[in-house]
Image (spheres, coloured by chain):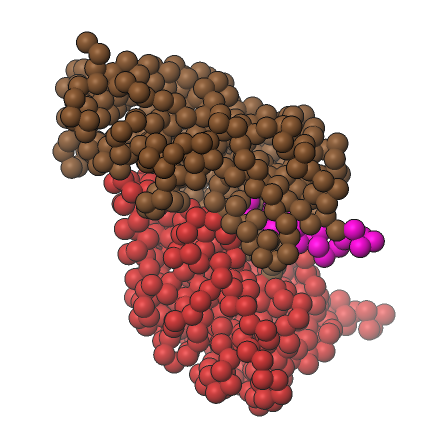
Chain colours: A red, B brown
Amino acid sequence: MHTGRETYLDWNATAPLRPEAAAAVSEALASWGNPSSVHRRGRVARRIIERAREEIAGLLGGVDPRGVVFVSGGTEANNLALLGTDRERVLVSAVEHDSVRQVLPTAETIPVDRDGVVAVDALDRLLAADPRPALVSVMFANNETGVIQPVGEIASLARRYGALFHCDAVQAAGRLALDTGAIGADLISLSAHKLGGPPAVGALVVTGDLDLASLLRGGGQERGRRAGTENVPGIAGFAAAAKAAVEEIAAYDRVRVLRASLEAEIAVAAPEAVIYGTGVMRLPNTSAIAMPGVAAETQVIALDLDGVMVSAGAACSSGKVGPSHVLAAMGVDAALAASTIRVSLGGSSSETDIAHFLHAWTALRRRHRGFSERARAA
Amino acid sequence: MSPRQLSRTAANTPPIYLDNQSTTRIDPRVLEAMLPYLTDDYGNPHSSSHAYGRNAAAVIHADPREIVFTSGATEANNLAIKGAAHFARTYSQSGHSRGHIIALQTEHKCVLESCKELEREGFSVTYMPVEPSGLVSLAALEAAISARTLLVSVMAAHNEIGVIQPLAEIGALCRSNGVLFHSDAAQAFGKIPLDVEAMKIDLLSISGHKIYGPKGIGALYVQRRPRVRLLPLIDGGGQERGLRSGTLPTPLCVGLGRAAAIAGEEMAEEAERLRRLSDGLLRNLARRLSGLRLNGDAERRLTGSLNLTLSGIPAQALIEACPSIAISTGSACTSASVEPSYVLRALGLSDELANASIRLGLGRFTTAAEVEFAADALAAAASGLTGRDGTPT
């Protein structure tokens, strides 16, 4: 049954643009100068960027704004972190986003446990085994399961071995109150569009005194760490979204309650369903749910026909849905992994949204179980 | 009201903008096309990007599948040069690796810096001198190409001096030697006719904000037949056929597409209007300022672009004396620097003359009245700085 209602539960793919961000983008589009120009138009654009740097620093509980390097998004931030630090060894967790995992073919993998949490003792052994200068890259929270990593522990371990620590906080920023001190990372990746800013803008935040080789060479923008005329409207929108996200962080307490009711309903309605990471710390908005025997693709399409938008794991390249490397790393059986969808909520998600999802999901389940039972009976 | 009576000195009056090489005001029609995508439409656009690339492709006679969206021309230039070099190094066959790159000394910083990075990695680079006109010498280019040459990078139209290079001739020379031809067309795209097929261009860089479109978006044309192979600079989700990972920014792609379509439609008319304006400006200034010289070829240049040396008048002082007009000494990327322009030095100008040079860039929204006002302001300021009236009468 499609009531015409649309329910968006794919916030980990992208979040709707916040009105504050839309206003900031429109305003900055109208003031259009090149921030490197010395004349007045240039100086106006420059001021927008420098103010934005302070807002982004605020998103991380206040770091030195000069450490904020604006880039074209989370993917570039991750690439820049791994390639710009030029460490001989790079260790990445098995559940990292492809923009970390695919960057260096020589990167070593840090295993995770069955809940998807990085095995800190394994990382300890990896670092102890080889004294070369290393970079450790572990995300704050996973995009598919929402599972939160013990970043503080990883940071102190890295520090003990003289390794740099990069943390991809793209999914966590704006959903959890972040504190750079607590994360303890040398480099933090952020994306605007995941927290209600415009697409094509993000930041790599360098918290300490660290040389970063530019990935893109050219004019000396961003203190020589990222060439190219700055995306001023994008940066303005990013800042406005970050400010709003910090102010409205409490909305995620409500989101956490909504998710809890969603998962409780699923457990009651479908005892065979599997929800990942429920025993460990997770983002308040993410739920990875398996409906055994029904392909994730089938679920996504059926839910979409009913007006509910979710995804089958990470939505990255066009139509490419492979097996989830995240679930595989957690030791999830391939068939079960292939029947797992990701439901991700956001600040404006409502009880009605959850009810809509549950209605469509249980109807889909009934149709498939009915079919299976008829098939068995035949 | 004549432009002379316009008061442009008040601090709250926007200066007359004659710095269109640096960036352009977004066209209201582009903004209008983008706004619905900023407000109404969300959803990770993992759908095909071909639709967005169609307009940009049409302007250069390419196929939409040959357009790779990037964050701007700097990234496009980095991707073209380093991507081609890294592919050649990784997949060289039978030990024969083409490890030589040719770029003009007057290329944009992002091309030169990409080349320098490759030099540090073991590639060899020839930085070709140019003629005093700023044009490439085809004979010298031919002589520089060897069996080891992988790629030639030549800017289509220059950001500081506006000269337009003989692209078809360079393309023919490259193609006959099996060398890739990359052209940075950030300034040329949408301003002069470009045909990647006829000009035998393999890789071409495009910028959004130089054509009255948004910042934060550009594109690289990558020829499909025969296929030009690159290694990506930014890896991850595999978007843009693996050449450029990262969520595609729909509003910006729409903006670039609309800007390209407008530029394609209005190119000829706009170029002619800017020719009249800039010729008039040049004549006006030449009449009033003795010793004025135009840098770069007088004929083969973008019609809205003027690079002028006012002998004996330091450009910085002149710019400061003209707060009512926004102009620059050269590339915005380096305009905070006090070094004389390396581009003008490559044309044979002395440091002193290079430091006495300004760049004027007229654009779509420049009016005749603004140009007249700017000529008066510049002439008056220049006279003040030389301590004498440059007007012959």
Q: Which segment is the magenta one?
A: B76-96
Give the camera-side residue of B298 and A168.
B298
Give the camera-side residue of B342 and B367.
B342
Residue A51, placed above or below residue A189:
above
Residue A78 visible at all = no
- In the rendered image, the quadrant that contains the C terminus of chain B is top left
Residue A327, placed above or below residue A121:
above
- In the rendered image, the quadrant that contains the N terminus of chain B is top left
Task: Find the residue positioned furthest to the top.
Answer: B393
Residue under the point 65% across and 28% down? B139
Give coordinates of residue A284: x percent, y percent: 45, 74
Residue B361 position by quadrant: top left
Give the camera-side residue of B99 and B204.
B99
Q: Magenta stretch containing residue A337, yes or no? A: no
Magenta stretch secondary structure, dominant = helix
Residue under the point 64% across and 33% down? B141
Residue under the point 44% across and 63% down? A204
**From the viewer's perspective, is B217 left or right of A20?**
right
Give coordinates of residue A237: x percent, y percent: 36, 52
Give the camera-side residue of B6 and A217.
A217
Residue B150 visible at all = yes
Residue A306, placed above or below residue B342:
below
Give coordinates of residue B278: x percent, y percent: 37, 19
Residue A69 position by quadrant: bottom left
Residue under the point 45% across and 19% down? B298
Give coordinates of residue B309: x percent, y percent: 34, 27
Q: Magenta stretch containing residue B82, yes or no? A: yes
